[in-house]
Amino acid sequence: MKTCVILYAGKVSPYALKNEFKGKTALDRSVEWAVNVEGAETLFILSSNPLECKVNSSVPIEFITESSWNTGLLLHHIDACMQKGGFSTAVYAWADCPFLDHSYTKELLSVHNKYRCEYTFAEGFSYGLTPEIIDNGTVRILKNLCEKNKEDDITRETIFDLLKTDINSFEIETYIAPFDLRSLRLHFHCGTKRNTVLCTRMFELLERGDESFEKLCTNIAILKTLPSYYALQISLPCSSSCTYCPYPSFLKEADGRITEKKLDRFMSKENFSTIISKISEFSGDAVISLSLWGEAMMHPQIEELIAVVLENKELSLVIETCSFEFTEEQIERIRSIVEKAGERENGQKSIYWIISVDANTESMYSAIHNDDFSLAKAVKNIELLKKYFNGAVYPQFMRLHENEEELEGFYRYWKAHENGELIIQKYDSFAGSLEDKKVADLSPVQRNPCWHLRNDIAVFIDGTVPLCRSVLPSCSCESNSSNIMGNIFADSLEKIWNKSTKDLENHCKNDYGELCRKCDEYYTFNF
């Protein structure tokens, strides 16, 4: 069967063009892999700008350039490339993956040809190690499937997502990874600063030749690169006293620790802007969550803070709220800010909303939230937000002993309602700070290094950075506490981030401190 290789470089980032791999770029290494794919007769590179590759090749390389790409154009050009050369099979990958592997590619092609498949993919691998194999007839069918959505943006899952819309109509085969690394959530591409750090570190470790790729994936330098999720407290007060939240007790006067009286009620716009600037510089892309504690929507400058975040194209926003009554005028203003900010470069929506509902009846809602707000008002808020942010609004249900009987009703209502977005959240005792109300044990059979220590940073209203979210605000004035990593206004993010590395190293050795030992959040992850 005649085979070609197609590399998509329409969204190649500046990181993929840096000489990070012994004088070569991620693009160079991707092209080197492509021209050495067994049996490949031509390499097609789909790009938005002219690209240079420092690769000597006996295989013809053709560049196809479009000023902007969408799903329809991608499939059109893949089809045209295959028809032009009479190719029956295309090996497809993104051009920013420096670790695409020849042996895995050979196995994929072998499976594809042996079973005369229409599409073959690898299962169990970290992203960036294997390509996709597509039959020429499949491409033409996909062109028809995407007709309604041909203007959609191209993602790394575009081909498979299209297949899933009518998956039973295709002959699909899978090549199973010899080792499953999916639980580590590693992505070996240079599309972001974080993943570029991952790739360069892996390259350096491989160059030493001491350990296998599989073993190196559990190295602390690989597991912990740059934070991707920042939970920021911008508001001290809260409009609710939820039974599953430890925060209300910390607002009360008790043993001289931080109280509402000792701090500004709201983080200043100046301080907030400083934090966002530091995040953008350090992480590149990230998701910003408001508010770690307190009610974010009570902040008198919340709209301005939203604008500060979205001025950075690589940042997205999550706002978690409870008993706050929105007005249509306010939501219209926020939508205007979002539209003006434009699309995100991190592949996320500009803003997500999570609304704590936790009930399916008024009586249960009142019992859990302990305030005068009603379930009807919460539902009204969700309806209003969906009107302006459809597809980005998530009613949330915290599973507790007392509300478990209402879970099914909640699920059925919101699953059938509009787009059906919802979140069913597991209970968190905050490392034993609260009574255990967990309905079911969802933890893995074997404990893994904490996902949050690998990816998250939390910031209290005074700038204090705890080890994690389970370290409660009362500790923020205890400067000598081992669970305080520093202060974001006084310390660099790099210094703060590196301070928690020792804790993660201990996790890798199955050594957990007192706080982590009591925590059941190590396997959960955020946006």
Image (spheres, rainbow, N blue to C red):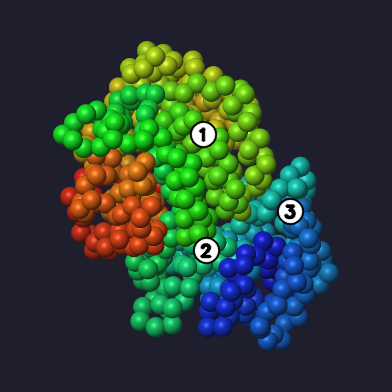
- How far across and down, in percent of the image, does residue 462 sit? 35, 43
Lateral position of residue 24 relative to residue 324, left or right: right
In this rendering, does residue 116 appear at all? no
Determine crowd level at label 3: few under 14, some 14-19, many 20+ residues with C-alpha closer than 10 A: some
- How far across and down, in percent of the image, does residue 405 sit? 36, 21
Query: Closer to the N terminus: mark 1 or mark 2?
Result: 2
Residue at (33, 18) in percent of width and height? 370
Q: Secondary structure at mark 2?
A: helix
The Cα atoms of the two marked residues, 2 and 3, are separated by 24 Å
The Cα atoms of the two marked residues, 1 and 2, are separated by 30 Å
Q: Secondary structure at mark 1?
A: loop
Residue underneath mark 3: 70
In the rendered structure, which amino acid carries the disc numbered 1?
Gln
In the rendered structure, which amino acid carries the disc numbered 2?
Lys
Query: Closer to the N terminus: mark 2 or mark 3?
Result: 3
Residue underneath mark 2: 193
- How far across and down, in percent of the image, does residue 195 sit? 50, 64
Determine crowd level at label 2: few under 14, some 14-19, many 20+ residues with C-alpha closer than 10 A: many
Q: Nearer the viewer, residue 249 or 30?
A: 249
Residue at (55, 73) in percent of width and height? 98
In the rendered structure, which amino acid carries the disc numbered 3?
Asn
Does the residue at mark 2 contact the one at mark 3 (Cβ under 8 Å)?
no
The Cα atoms of the two marked residues, 3 and 1, are separated by 37 Å
Quadrant including the N terminus: bottom right
Query: Closer to the N terminus: mark 3 or mark 1?
Result: 3
Q: Nearer the viewer, residue 133 or 517?
A: 517
Residue at (55, 44) in percent of width and height? 308
Q: Is residue 244 above or below residue 10?
A: above
Residue underneath mark 1: 301
In this rendering, does residue 494 appear at all? yes
Determine crowd level at label 1: few under 14, some 14-19, many 20+ residues with C-alpha closer than 10 A: some
Q: Secondary structure at mark 3?
A: loop
